[in-house]
Structures are given as C-alpha cells and as structure tokens.
Image (cartoon, helix red, strand yellow):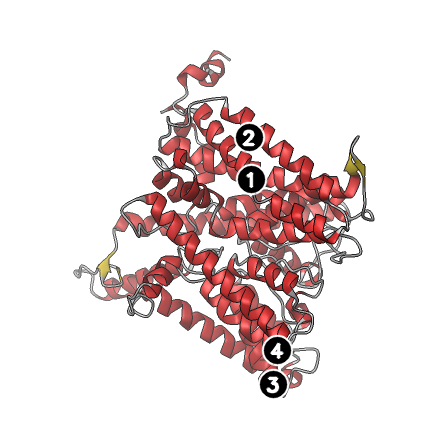
Amino acid sequence: MSAVRDWLTPTRLRVNWRASAALTGTVVKWLSVPLLLPLAVAAYYGDGGVAAFVVTVAVALVAGAALERLGDPDDLGAREGFLMVAATWLAVSLVGALPYLFAAHGVPGVAAATAPASTLGDPVNALFESTSGFTTTGATVMGDISFDTHSHGILLWRQLTQWLGGMGIVVLAVAILPELSVGGAQLMEAEAPGPGIEKLTPRIAETARVLWLAYAGITAVEVLLLYGLHHAGFAPNMGLYNAVAHGFTTMATGGFSPEARSIEAFSGVVQWVIVPFMVAAGTNFALIWQALTGDRDALFGDAEFRFYLGVLGTATALIAGLLFTGPALDTVVGPVAGDLEPSLRHAAFQAVSIVTTTGYASMDFAQWGGAAQYVLFVAIFLGGSAGSTGGAVKMVRWLVILKSLKRELFTTVHPEAVEPVRLGGRALDEQAIRGIYAFTAVYFALFVAGSVFVAMDSTRIEQTLSALEVMSAVAATLGNVGPGFGAVGPMGFYEFLPATTKLLMVGLMWVGRLEILPVLVLLTRSYWKT
C-alpha cells in the first residue's frame, strides 16, 4: 500500500497536470465563440434551441475560467502536451453534448423543451453524437434527422463540430491564441492526423494559421459552388443552409448531413461536385498550400499523393465494374446495374467517401451485394494522407509497409544487400518504420478487441448482429469513418446498441482521432513517474 501511496503523491509526478488543465480550460472557454453561430441561426429561424446555446456558452465560459485558474500555462513540456491534447478533446466533446441535452429536455428554470423528444435526450447518446462530431467520425445515433424533431441551430451545431474538429481543435487554438504559441509545436505533433505535421513557416503559430486558411478557403469555395448549383436549377434543395452544412462536413471528412438520406437526397450533379472536395480533404493540406503558392510539383511530385490517387482509382474501378454488372453477380439492388454513368458516379463517390473517411452516402451501399461491400470494408482501414482531415491508418503508413515488405523480399534473395526504404527519394529511418508497424499492430489489436467486446455485449442483451455489422461498426468508429454495414449502414444509426457499446465507441473515436499512441502513453507508469 505504501508503494501505491508513493506513486500517487503529486510531488513525485513528472507531469505538471495543472498546466495541462489550465490550457484545456483556455480552449474550453474559447469554444463559446463558435457556439454563437448556431445560437444566431436558432434565433433567426425561431424553431427552438436559443436557450440551449445560451446556457452552453455560459457553461463553457465558467468551466474554462475555472480550469485556467488551476495552473500556469507557460509550464508546458512534451508530457504536458500529450495530456492537454487528450483532455481537450474529451472536454470539448462533453461541452458539445450540452446543446443536445438542453434542447431535448429544456433548460431547468429557464425554458421548457421546444422540440419533440429525440434520441439525443439520453446523455450517452448526446455524448456519442458530440464525440462523433468533433472527431469527424460521422456515426450517428439520430434516427430522426429532420427539422420536425431538431431545430436548425441544433443541426448546424452538429455540422459545425465536425468542421472545428477536422483540421484540429488544438491546431486552431495554436493559430489564434498567443498563450499556446510557445508550446505549439509539441501540441500540434500530439494532435497531428498522421505521422507528423510539416512546418511550412518559421513560426509554428503561422503554420497553424496557414493550414486553417487553406482549410477555410476550400470550404468557402465548396459552399459557393453548391449554392450556385441551387441557383442554376441543378440542386433545388441545396439552399444556403444545406450548402454551408455540407461545406462544413465535406472538408472535415465528417459526413454528417441535415438530410436523413445523406447525399442521396441531392442530384447527381451535386454528388459529382462533392467528389473532388472529398479528394482534397483527404490530401495533405501542406501540399495543397504549396501548390496554391506556386509549387507546381508539390502534389504530383509527392509519393504519398500518387499512391493515394492510385488507391482511389483502383477502388473506383473495382466497384464500378461490380455495380455495372450487378444482376449477374448479385451485386446491387436498384436501378444502377447496366447503366454506366450512375455506376461510375456511385462507385467514385462511395470509394472516395470511405477511403477518405468522409462517410457520406450517395445511395444505400448496405444493400449492395457481397463483393462490392467487401471492397468498401477494406477501404475503411485505408484513410487519407498524413496532414489531411482523414482518419484510419493513413496512406503514408500503408505505402511504407508495402515498401518495407518489398525490401524484405529483396533481402531474402540477396541477404548481403543493404537496401533502405525510400519515400520521395529519401531513406527512411529504421526507427520510423518500426513506429509505423507498431501503430498498425496496435490499431488492429484495438479493432479485434473492440469487435469481440461489441459481439459479446450484443449477445448479453440478446441482440442479433452479424459479424460484418459488428466489425464494420468498430472499424468505422476507430477509423473515424462513420457508417458501417447492415443496421449501422449509411441509412441506419447506432442508437439501438447498448449503452456500454456506445461508450466503448466513444472511446474508440477519441483514441482513433488522436492516433492511438498519444493516448495510450498516458496509461503507462513511465509517462507519469520517470
């Protein structure tokens, strides 16, 4: 017992948790600013939710200020950075759940609920939806996505959480908050969506601003194009609200939509327009910025980008062939088979959507036959490029794994040869290669463990789920993809799962968004004590 007490003694901790808590409080406090947008939308449409956002803003300000008083934010090292980033993503997800709860139940002593009861009135469901939003997963517990049940403000908050989480909450904080600029490099490294983040300017805060500027600029272009299609008569239901909502969730590779049928609710022209923006969202934003600032070779000179395009093209060709020849292979239900344009459109849309982990649906691919579904299931594990908003394993890791396997085959035949693994003409450090293998091994270990838990949990309540439904649900939440297959498919939802399974998936979404290892390191004794 004395050893336990000694380990828990605060003075022996090597981590200044108070500094981490203070910086987390700063981010929570400033979360009140984006909350003003859905508040204004709720007030404009007058369909409820104003009180829910007013109280949430107050909670964010008070809770953030209280956390700031716990410590000195200047005392930030690498260990504090890991803790701050992990805690920040948990904190914003908790605060982000409050508008859903207040809108469903009303604000005690302030206002009664102004909308019919929804699934988001359950605290576990509200936390699931909020975490899915901020981590850009796109899995939903809402089986009732409509303005009859939810206000315009609540549905816009759902979209906005994904846009905020896409490029990174902490990256945004580093870009705009001077108190985070000193330790910004450590924080961005801990949050980076991939093996690392490229420093584009001498100052890390300026790099963060550059990344967010590119992200916001491309979002604005998509919104204008979608709204332009509406005015041109190609998208009657793509009004300004829908254009902004889908701009937010495309570039974030999030996939939330205020339409119950996702992008199936819009015309084929809209679906074609969204595809290149999903491709851009899955591309390293550092490369996009370099290309926009005059470096013509930035994109196609990058090995990962070429591999990424090759994967997208291969997946599209496979699915298009399966859809086009549907009846003969029992591949698809519906009018797509034998029609070239819809086959190509739905194949390209779903291949890009799943590979980049956006999670939109142009049709209910859960109704496709086995072969096409299995192609998409494999695609769930691929992910976008490093430095993009995509989740899952990431293209650069798969590329390095393939190159290292090729090297092993070569050295098996030529044991005396020294053959480094090269990426973009540069020899990779062996430690970096081992790190990629370690990440991938842990990723699939979590996938297997999560699948076993979900299968056992569903059996506990006598719920029947197929193996594909179980594995796709776990893979989709761990990889921040969103939809799976079957009951959790693109036109389904996760609400029917037991609360214990949904809480596990909240953890998987959180761990998956933060690239696993920065979270797991917090569970080691050496992180806290040595």
- Asked where in the image residue 233 lies, by quadrant, the reply is bottom right
- Asked where in the image residue 143 lies, by quadrant, the reply is bottom right
Q: Secondary structure at mark 2?
A: helix
> Is there CB contact under 8 Å for labels 1 and 2?
yes
Distance, label 4 to label 2, CA atoms, is 45 Å
Q: Secondary structure at mark 3?
A: loop
Q: Front-most of 241 and 366?
A: 241
Q: Which residue is mark 4?
A: 232
Q: Amino acid at mark 4?
A: Ala
Image mark for residue 31: 1
Distance, label 4 to label 1, CA atoms, is 37 Å
Residue at screen point 61% across, 54% down: 159
Q: Secondary structure at mark 1?
A: loop
As drawn, which residue projects farthest toward the front? 44
Q: Amino acid at mark 2?
A: Gly
Residue at screen point 44% across, 31% down: 524
